[in-house]
Image: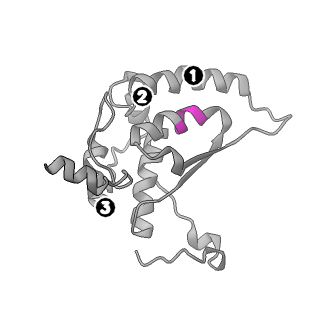
């Protein structure tokens, strides 16, 4: 946790690159990456940038970010498209995104109740591995265990701090 990244250009990329190995879907990928960042750097990120296919933007920027209540002003999405002439079927992928992800996460933001989303997670975890994040990110333990369907209501490390005047009004 003594990582100093203020002059990251002098540190080789290979020394600044880590992986997150427990996520079983896109929601967990984003949530667990916040924990992994904290494990490596010692604090939660102030900004998040997701790089993925352009057609996944709604899922990450609107749905997953909102479920995690990460501030919109501190979140960015960099969409990329498959190169022209590639064999990637963009139309089919966009249809699959809507049917197999967007609609499911709209109804089940945390992926705990949809039979399809739960089955995907189970199929991607044949050895029943568990994450270390409730221990390494104890301030997110309640979020890690939250299944909704409502949005997680409690304070999060990236939640804006209440103003003193708001706190005084609450105490009065």
Q: Which residue is mark 3?
A: 136
Q: Which residues are magenta?
A: 57-61
CA distance separating discs 1 and 2:
14 Å
Say whether residue 103 is left or right of residue 137.
right
Q: Label 3 crowding class (10 Å Cα cut-off): few <14, some 14-19, many 20+?
A: some
Q: Element at badge 3?
A: helix
Q: Element at badge 1?
A: helix
The label shown at residue 117 is 2
The answer to whether residue 134 of the structure is visible from this angle is no
Of badges 2 and 3, the one in the foreground is 3
The image shows residue 5, relative to residue 77, as above or below, that is: below
Say whether residue 150 is left or right of residue 46.
left
Q: Label 1 crowding class (10 Å Cα cut-off): few <14, some 14-19, many 20+?
A: some
Q: Residue at coordinates 48% horizontally, 59% vertically from top-left?
A: 46
Q: Residue at coordinates 57% horizontally, 70% vertically from top-left?
A: 16
Q: Which residue is mark 1?
A: 98
The answer to whether residue 106 of the structure is visible from this angle is yes
Q: Element at badge 2?
A: helix
Q: Label 2 crowding class (10 Å Cα cut-off): few <14, some 14-19, many 20+?
A: many
Reading the chain from its start, which is encountered first: label 1 or label 2? 1
């Amino acid at each position: 946790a003594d990582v100093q990244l203020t002059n990251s250009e002098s540190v080789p990329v290979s020394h600044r690159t880590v992986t997150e190995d427990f996520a079983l879907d896109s929601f967990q990928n984003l949530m667990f990456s916040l924990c992994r960042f904290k494990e490596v750097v010692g604090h939660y990120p102030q900004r998040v940038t997701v790089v993925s296919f352009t057609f996944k933007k709604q899922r990450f920027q609107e749905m997953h970010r909102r479920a995690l209540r990460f501030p919109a002003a501190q979140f960015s999405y960099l969409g990329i498209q498959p190169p022209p002439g590639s064999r990637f079927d963009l139309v089919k992928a966009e249809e699959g995104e809507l049917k197999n992800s967007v609609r499911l996460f709209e109804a089940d933001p945390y992926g705990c109740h949809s039979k399809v989303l739960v089955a995907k997670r189970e199929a991607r975890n044949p050895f029943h591995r568990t994450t270390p994040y409730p221990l390494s990110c104890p301030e997110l333990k309640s979020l890690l265990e939250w299944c909704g369907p409502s949005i997680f209501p409690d304070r999060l490390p990236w939640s804006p701090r209440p103003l003193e005047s708001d706190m005084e009004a609450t105490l009065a």
